[in-house]
Image (tube, grey):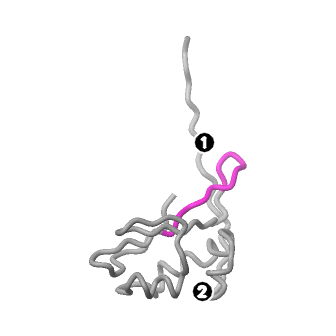
Amino acid sequence: MCTAFIFLPRRPPTLSIVPFSSVEWKKGDAALRGKMAKQVCGLRILRGRTQQEVLSILGEPDRRTEERWDYRVNTGAKFVGTTWTSNLVVSYQNHTVASIDLRD
């Protein structure tokens, strides 16, 4: 028996950008957050902030550890016709933001 694997490339997202708003982020869904995620990373609005400050800006994360908070976002990427969700990952060092990344 021969097994073959076919890897299909993920279609790049057609990302529309919405200006960041803390109020809209907190009440928005993953799709709205996805439209703001690049700005959260690029504008450095979280850099050096404490965990309490991030809570007031972004609200509760979808998943958290002491050193990493994940916020689920939908950037519009698709894989084999299925929506591919990503995470806005806020990493902490000494309880302050060390990095912000957008990860699959």
Instruction: Inspect the magenta stretch and tell me whether residue 86 lies in it.
Output: yes
Q: Residues within 10 Å of mark 2 (few under 14, many from 20)?
A: some
Q: Residue furthest top?
A: 1
The boundaries of the magenta stretch are 78-88
Q: Amino acid at mark 1?
A: Leu
> x%, y% of residue 75?
62, 66
Q: Secondary structure at mark 1?
A: loop
Query: Is 21 left or right of 100, judged from the image as shown?
Result: right
Magenta part, dominant SS: strand
> x%, y% of residue 47?
38, 84
Residue 44 showing in the rendered view = no
> x%, y% of residue 100?
42, 74
Q: Which quarter of the figure has residue 59? A: bottom right
Residue 20 numbered mark, or none? 2
> x%, y% of residue 92?
34, 74
Name the mark nearer the viewer: 1 or 2: 2
Instruction: Note whether 17 is above or below 75 in the view shown.
Output: below
Q: Which quarter of the figure has residue 39? A: bottom right
Q: Amino acid at mark 2?
A: Phe
Residue 8 numbered mark, or none? 1
> Residue visible at 56% across and 38% down?
7
Residue 104 showing in the rendered view = yes
